[in-house]
């Protein structure tokens, strides 16, 4: 998706050969017009898959997931990283390690929002080693739901996430595939 690549080139900040900061439009400040375009693109790529729910992880996946949900006219569920007083019973859980935050989180979704009759699209902001996607896949599998695919805003293709998810049999659609982060520059797989 050329619009997204352009924004990454203009506003992304390469912090190291493994870390790309995109807080100007996705991870801290959100550009609603760009999110609308991302949601439209995800919807187009998965429109024929019979999606009944979209699942993402709080927090940075929520904006593109909601926009895709609007396009597909389906609810969006976000797995919570922190359990609250209102989320205590009948939970689907998984453990997820965050590379950028260097912490392990237990993520949760209530069973009342996800069932075996659902066909789920996973949407997330980044794909690196695939830990977040694998955690969401575990939760969806626990519910007995089927997975239509994994939609990723920015994939770091030099890490193992895509390979691991495809080996598990999942379709991966990334809107921008980063080939390399080097000397403050981003190169993409076209």
Image (spheres, grey):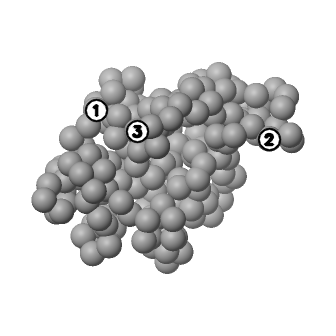
User: Along the line of sight, which residue is nearer the eye, 34 or 46?
Assistant: 34
Q: In this rendering, would 2 be left or right of 152?
A: left
Given contact means CB atoms under 8 Å apart, are the residues at marks 2 and 1 in contact? no
Q: Residue at x 48, y 61 (%)?
A: 27
- Residue 99 circle label: 3
Mark found first going from the N terminus, 1 or 3: 3
Secondary element at tag 2: loop
Is 114 in front, or is 109?
Answer: 109
Q: Is residue 53 left or right of residue 97?
A: right
Residue at image coords 29%, 65%: 13
Q: CA distance from mark 2 to mark 1?
A: 33 Å
Q: Where's residue 75, x and y in %?
A: 69, 52
State the residue position of label 2. 84
Which is closer to the viewer, label 2 or label 1? 2
Q: Which mark is residue 160?
A: 1
Residue 100 quadrant = top left
Comparing 108 with 33, the one in front is 108
């Amino acid at each position: 998706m050329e619009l997204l690549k352009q924004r990454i080139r203009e506003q992304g900040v390469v912090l190291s050969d493994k870390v790309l900061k995109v807080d100007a439009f996705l991870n801290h400040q959100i550009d609603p017009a760009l999110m609308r375009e991302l949601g439209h693109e995800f919807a187009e790529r998965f429109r024929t898959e019979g999606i009944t729910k979209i699942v993402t992880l709080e927090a940075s996946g929520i904006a593109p997931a909601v926009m895709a949900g609007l396009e597909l006219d389906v609810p969006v569920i976000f797995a919570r990283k922190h359990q609250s007083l209102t989320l205590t019973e009948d939970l689907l859980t998984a453990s997820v390690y965050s590379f950028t935050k260097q912490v392990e989180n237990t993520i949760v979704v209530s069973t009342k929002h996800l069932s075996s009759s659902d066909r789920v699209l996973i949407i997330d902001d980044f794909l690196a080693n695939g830990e977040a996607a694998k955690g969401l896949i575990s939760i969806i599998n626990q519910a007995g739901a089927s997975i239509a695919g994994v939609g990723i805003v920015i994939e770091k293709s030099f890490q193992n996430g895509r390979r691991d998810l495809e080996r598990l049999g999942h379709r991966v659609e990334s809107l921008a595939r980063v080939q390399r982060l080097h000397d403050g520059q981003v190169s993409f797989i076209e």
